[in-house]
Image: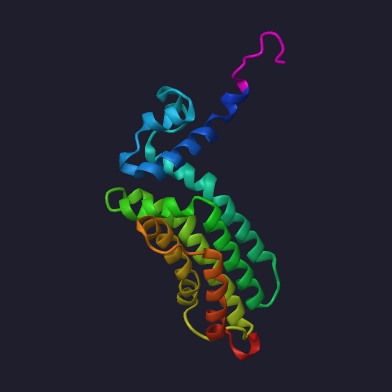
Amino acid sequence: MLPVGEPRWRRRKEARPGEIVAAALAVFAEKGFAAARLDDIAARAGVSKGALYLYFETKQDLFAAVVRDAISPNLAAVEVAAGAINLPFAVIIRALIEQAAEMMTVSPVGPVAKMVIAESRNFPELARVWHDEVVARMLGVLTGLIERAQAKGEVRPGDARFHALALIGPLLMGVLWREVLTPVGAAPLDLRALARQHVDTILAGLLAEGGR
């Protein structure tokens, strides 16, 4: 029971930015960026369009908030873990790739990535945000781990960034397969199983004698 005179909407007002971001994510996933209207997002969030503008001036601002609130926290946890764990490269990378597959399975990474690829030509700001907040950070974590392992003699010589792309590439392909091809009849793809098989295969080629 609220005290007499206490505004009934105080809690909801404090929660509104998060509700708007969640609504934007749902509308972007359903309609894409160009077709998504701020009216649709406001209606999904249960706020007026004017109230939406109190928090976000443009759809680009909303997209940046979607990436920051729905995806970046997962990456931040990976960055912290990668910097703190001192285990053999094979152990770390196996856990990291499987964690990435889990995140791609249960989080909205897939629909957002599909939207960015489809619409970045007309909205290059989407690609910039996606690169800076997701791609560059994940690639940076993997590249750093590989460079550290190379210095220890665990991983073969070679461009660490190329090795990182080889590690993460099949998972990105798996996400696009799930988002683009499965809906039109392609066989479903289990990202977790793909990650397990892929990491076994690539470690066999990456690891030097000192990392086996």
* Residue occupying the point 61% across, 72% down: 94
Q: Position of residue 135 (x, y in %)?
A: 46, 60
- The answer to whether residue 119 is magenta is no
The percent coordinates of residue 205 (x first, y second) are 53, 85
Residue at the image position 28 percent from the left and 53 percent from the top: 121
User: Can residue 127 be seen by looking at this rendering?
Assistant: no
Q: Which residue occupies the extreme top position in the image?
A: 4
Q: Residue 35, how many percent across, how many down?
A: 31, 40
Q: Residue at x 52, y 70 (%)?
A: 194
The quarter of the image holding the N terminus is: top right
Q: Is residue 157 left or right of residue 78?
A: left
In reply to whether residue 8 is colored magenta, the answer given is yes
State whether residue 193 is above or below residue 176: below
Image height check: is 200 above or below 85? Answer: below
115 vs 148, nearest the viewer = 115
Quadrant housing residue 99: bottom right
State the residue in front, 101 or 117: 101
The magenta segment = 1-10
